[in-house]
Image (cartoon, rainbow, N blue to C red):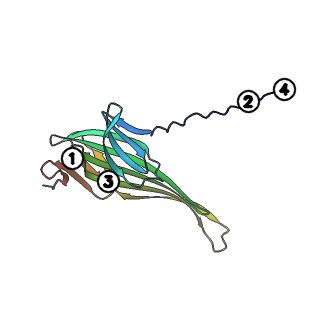
Amino acid sequence: MLCFITLVNAQKKKVPAATPVLAKVENLVLELKTGNLQLVQMEGTKVKETVVVQANATTMKPTDCKIIPLTASGTKLYAVSWTEKKTVTTPDKTEEITTVTHAIYEWKTKKQVFFNTQITNNITEKVYLDRNRNASETQMKVRREGYELILNPDGTVTQKNKTSMLTWTYDATKMEMVQVKKK
């Protein structure tokens, strides 16, 4: 009695995973690719042009990503925004750090015309009331850094924090956002 056994081992060709799209508007796509957060102009399914928004973003986990088109001084601009959250925990303290970032681009020249970062740090801390650490209470604090950014319908940008408010408008000749002086 003769028995033949044939083993066939076939592997499927691995298809590279598609880069996840974080936000999309018109023909622009925001994606995290090759360690960079980038804004990509698509022509159908092909990449036409790319602008790196944040380089070396390998540890970045952006959420709530948006691309908002706006017109300022007759020029089409795109505001890109994203949120990052990080938690730092020690035995007596927990910090939840939320960073909201905005970058505004003039797409014809691929130039970044404005950048803003706002950091909110929610701190929960166990504070001891005596030297022997017998009694304690939990305290909560909020620390804010930077400005909150508001995109206005007329194409201006408002930055505000607890003590001040700044308004910026796009200057087409300088190709940058300039601060509006108070009258």
Q: Nearer the viewer, residue 23 or 81?
A: 23
Residue on which the image places disc 4: 2
- Helix, strand or loop at label 3? It is strand
**Residue 118 occupies quadrant:** bottom left
Q: Residue at x 14, y 53 (%)?
A: 174
Secondary structure at badge 1 equals loop
**Residue tagged 1:** 109
Tag in front: 2 or 3: 2
Mark 3 lies on residue: 116
Q: Is residue 68 above or below residue 34?
A: above
Q: CA distance from mark 2 to mark 4?
A: 13 Å
Q: Amino acid at mark 2?
A: Thr
> Which one is earlier in the sequence, the residue at label 3 or at label 4?
4
Quadrant position of residue 22: top left
Task: Give how far across and how far down residue 153 sits, in percent.
Answer: 23, 39
Q: Are marks 2 and 3 in contact (CB under 8 Å)?
A: no
Q: Which residue is mark 2?
A: 6
Q: Are the residues flagged by discs 4 and 1 in contact, CB closer than 8 Å?
A: no
In space, the residues marked 4 and 1 are separated at their CA atoms by 75 Å
Q: CA distance from mark 1 to mark 3?
A: 20 Å
Q: What residue sits 42% from the left and 48% below the top?
A: 83
Left or right of 131: which side holds 169? left
Label 2: how many Cα within 10 Å (few below 14, some 14–19, many 20+): few
Q: Quadrant of the C terminus?
A: bottom left
Q: Position of residue 7 (x, y in %)?
A: 72, 32
- Residue 162 bears which disc, if any? none
- Nearest to the eye among marks 3 and 4: give it: 4
In which quadrant will I find the N terminus?
top right
3D distance between C-alphas at marks 3 and 4 = 77 Å
